[in-house]
Amino acid sequence: MQLRTKQLISGSAAMMLSLSALSVAAQASCANKSSIGVSRTITIDAAGGKLYGGLQYTAGDLLRDGEFILTFDDGPLRRYTRKVLAALKSHCTKASFFMVGRMAVADPAMVREVESAGHTIANHTWSHKNLQRRSARRAAGEIELGISAVRIAAQKPISPFFRFPYLADPKAMIAYGKSRDMAIFSIDIDSNDYKTKSPGRVYSTIMSQVRSRRKGIMLFHDIQRSTAGAMQRILDTMQREGFKIVHVVSKAPVGTIEEFDVQAQALHDKRRTVATAKAIGGGDYEKASRPRRTIRRTVVKSSDRKAIVSKAAAKRSNAFPSRTSAIAQPQIRPQPKADWRKNVWGNN
């Protein structure tokens, strides 16, 4: 299927290029005189797709000795993302947030809070599925719905940066990312924050790698309490030991596909409707004024229970389809008896 993308906002490239000067000015006015700040801003042209991160790729080394890129996956999650933002703000530094689409739908205001603080907003799929275990059609749908959902939450285009969930990067989806002009980010340094609730453990895990590797893309998760609790100490130590933070921005934002914009907007609208209903019906006054109801208990024969349960389950299934079935996917269909990879991605 030929993808129809929206026209990118004019002047976006100039806006991205100006971020470097802005970051220098922000660092100069930082209240924390011993902040780590941003040593430099790298503007990435993602056209044609590029691969970064030494754990999986070798072609895209962006950094000099002593330089690191901060990245956060899986959010936003307000109670921890805000603590991460506070630590970053205290050091007047910037990071890249690879957001999950359904998390963005759950809290779009938090997406805008991250963006307004000057951080890079990137895509981490719609629902954090392992794309190695999905068909090409469903994997592409996960990527595209993620882009659209995060863009709508941010209320502006996002960067063309993408990270595979679990770092599981099937070759077919790398090729798809290249066709969509997305830069794919792996990692060099892993906090393993999802394995522990201890901020001290995350701190020691990170700092041992920082000191031994001397540069790299760092992976954290802003949905983890351990990372939220460790970030201030990590940045304090990195600044004290002379390490530097580099901020990556894109030359131009990523385009979206209309079909997925429509689906993402519907999901956002549904979320707002549910939130409004809860706000209207959640007050103590409303509870107190609700008329009392007499509950009549009915004894149901055991022979009838299975039929009742099955009927209720069918009703729920029709009313609330599964996330996967609710997401329309790109119509990628190979011709019979043909190499599906060539049909979908040509010779890539």
Image (tube, rainbow, N blue to C red):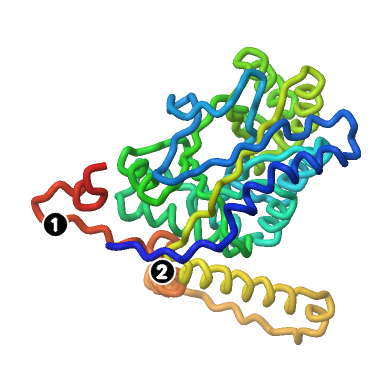
Residue 95 x/y as whole percent: 67, 40
325 sits left or right of 211 in the view = left
Q: Identify the residue at the far bottom of this view.
A: 291
Kind of residue sitting beneath label 2: Glu
Residue 176 tag number? none
47 sits left or right of 196 in the view = left
Residue 271, quarter of the rendered image: bottom right
Foreground of the two, 29 or 148: 29
- Secondary structure found at label 2: helix
Kind of residue sitting beneath label 1: Gln
Q: Is residue 303 visible?
A: no
> Looking at the image, is 231 positioned above or below residue 145?
above
Q: Could you tell me which residue is drawn at 60 percent across and 57 percent down?
A: 104
> Looking at the image, is 146 positioned above or below residue 304?
above
In the picture of the structure, the residue carrying the numbered disc 2 is 259
Q: Could you tell me which residue is drawn at 66 percent across and 21 percent down?
A: 205
124 sits left or right of 72 in the view = left
How many marks the image carries: the answer is 2
In the picture of the structure, the residue carrying the numbered disc 1 is 335
Foreground of the two, 19 or 227: 19
Residue 153 x/y as whole percent: 61, 62
How far is mark 2 from mark 1, CA to CA?
Answer: 23 Å
Return the disc, 2 or 1, that comes first in the chain's sequence: 2
Residue 51 x/y as whole percent: 44, 35
Where the C terminus falls, by quadrant?
Answer: top left
Q: Could you tell me which residue is drawn at 73 percent across and 55 percent down?
A: 116
- Secondary structure found at label 1: loop
